[in-house]
Image (cartoon, helix red, strand yellow):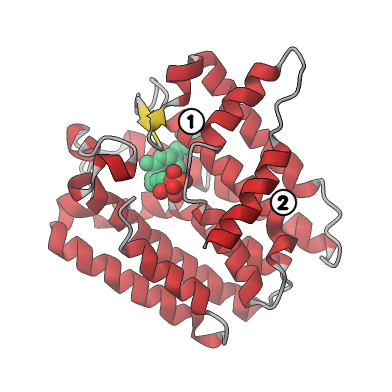
């Protein structure tokens, strides 16, 4: 994964350079969370998808940066006192703990808007312009009320979720950006309908497996590896795959969804990297 992470990291550094102007504090706050050490999962999925489809990963780089900015904004806002009120994220004090609540809200907002500026302010040589517009629409939808934000509001408003509601809310809250990563990678690479559907299926199943592992780590993970306290789901009385099914069944479910994800890629010859990524994610410690 490292070559993809290096690619997106250096592109992100170019996007969020601290300027010597009166608003330089906002760039500092944006960069603080962006470079706090995330896994870069969503950009990696996007670039691996392009590679699998025979394209250079660089062609999706503006959108790969954009999706990481949106993901980081969601983490900053999710940690705010009005949401989860968390003190630690990615092993460091949360954005509002360092810069204050008002600046953290603005840093999240600025990352969201910079994401779209970055995604569409590029020449996209060799990429059909209609595909760029379609990719931008996918990104907006995945981040919005029928995507990540929709999942968050269902999460806030519901208690004692059953399996169906849990799956629904995570398909939006966690799943929408993961799905968009693969689908946007496919669209920008000029994939056809059947290929896009297969990548969509891969990402949907991967997103569920990823969330189940997230729930497992909240119970039996290591705080030093995770960079945040464990046990927050239990503390907040949250329904999770672990509270619904127990740890062993949750583990077998995450295996099952990973198998389903990998099966979706059967139509591709070069799916090795994405399959290995899926395997790695359910064994991850952070
Ligand atoms: C408040 C705008 C807003 C959105 C809230 C996505 C979300 C909705 C909140 C993020 C917090 C959260 C616990 C999401 C569920 C699982 C998840 C997406 C975990 C973090 O993703 P990783 O593991 O994080 O990819 P890193 O730090 O590695 O990038």
Direction from residue 15 to residue 83 in the image, left or right: left
Q: Residues within 10 Å of mark 2 (few under 14, many from 20)?
A: many
Q: CA distance from mark 2 to mark 1?
A: 21 Å
Direction from residue 147 to residue 20 in the image, left or right: right
Residue 283 seen by the camera: yes
Residue where numbered disc 1 is placed: 76
Q: Quadrant of ligand 1?
A: top left
Q: Position of residue 170 (x, y in %)?
A: 38, 51
Q: Nearer the viewer, residue 224 or 142?
A: 224
Q: Which disc number belongs to residue 127?
A: none
Q: Position of residue 263 (x, y in %)?
A: 42, 81
Identify the residue at horizontal 41%, vertical 60% (top origin): 207
Mark 2 and ligand 1: say if the CB distance to the nearest ligand atom is below 8 Å: no
Residue 144 seen by the camera: no
Give above or below for 259 relative to 178: below
Number of numbered markers: 2
Direction from residue 13 to residue 282 in the image, left or right: left
Q: Position of residue 210 (x, y in %)?
A: 36, 58
Q: Quadrant of residue 183?
A: bottom right
Identify the residue at horizontal 31%, vertical 51% (top origin): 214
Identify the residue at horizontal 55%, vertical 37% (top origin): 35
Mark 1 and ligand 1: say if the CB distance to the nearest ligand atom is below 8 Å: no
Tell whether label 1 touches label 2 (CB within 8 Å).
Answer: no
Give above or below for 25 relative to 165: above
Give above or below for 8 relative to 36: below
Q: Nearer the viewer, residue 46 or 234?
A: 46
Under circle 1, the secondary element is: helix
Residue where numbered disc 2 is placed: 62
Q: Residues within 10 Å of mark 1 (few under 14, many from 20)?
A: many
Mark toward the start of the polypeptide (2 vs 1): 2
Under circle 2, the secondary element is: helix
Identify the residue at horizontal 30%, vertical 63% (top origin): 283
């Amino acid at each position: 994964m490292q070559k993809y992470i290096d690619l997106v990291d250096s592109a992100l550094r170019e996007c969020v350079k601290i300027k010597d102007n009166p608003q330089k504090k906002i760039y500092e706050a944006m960069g603080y969370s962006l470079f706090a050490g995330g896994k870069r999962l969503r950009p990696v999925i996007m670039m691996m998808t392009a590679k699998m489809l025979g394209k250079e990963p660089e062609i999706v780089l503006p959108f790969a940066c954009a999706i990481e900015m949106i993901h980081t904004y969601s983490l900053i806002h999710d940690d705010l006192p009005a949401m989860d009120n968390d003190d630690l994220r990615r092993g460091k004090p949360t954005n509002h703990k360092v810069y204050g609540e008002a600046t953290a809200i603005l840093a999240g907002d600025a990352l969201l808007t910079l994401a779209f500026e970055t995604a569409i302010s590029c020449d996209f040589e060799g990429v059909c312009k209609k595909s760029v517009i379609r990719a931008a629409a996918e990104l907006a939808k995945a981040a919005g009320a029928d995507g990540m934000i929709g999942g968050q509001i269902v999460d806030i408003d519901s208690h004692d979720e059953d399996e169906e509601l849990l799956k629904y809310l995570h398909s939006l809250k966690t799943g929408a950006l993961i799905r968009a990563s693969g689908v946007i990678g496919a669209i920008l690479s000029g994939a056809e309908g059947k290929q896009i559907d297969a990548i969509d299926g891969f990402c949907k199943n991967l997103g569920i497996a990823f969330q189940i592992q997230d729930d497992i780590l909240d119970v039996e993970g290591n705080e030093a590896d995770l960079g945040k306290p464990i046990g927050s789901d239990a503390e907040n009385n949250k329904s999770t795959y672990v509270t619904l099914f127990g740890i062993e069944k949750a583990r077998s479910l995450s295996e099952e969804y990973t198998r389903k994800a990998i099966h979706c890629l059967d139509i591709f010859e070069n799916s090795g990297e994405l399959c290995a990524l899926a395997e790695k994610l359910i064994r991850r410690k952070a």
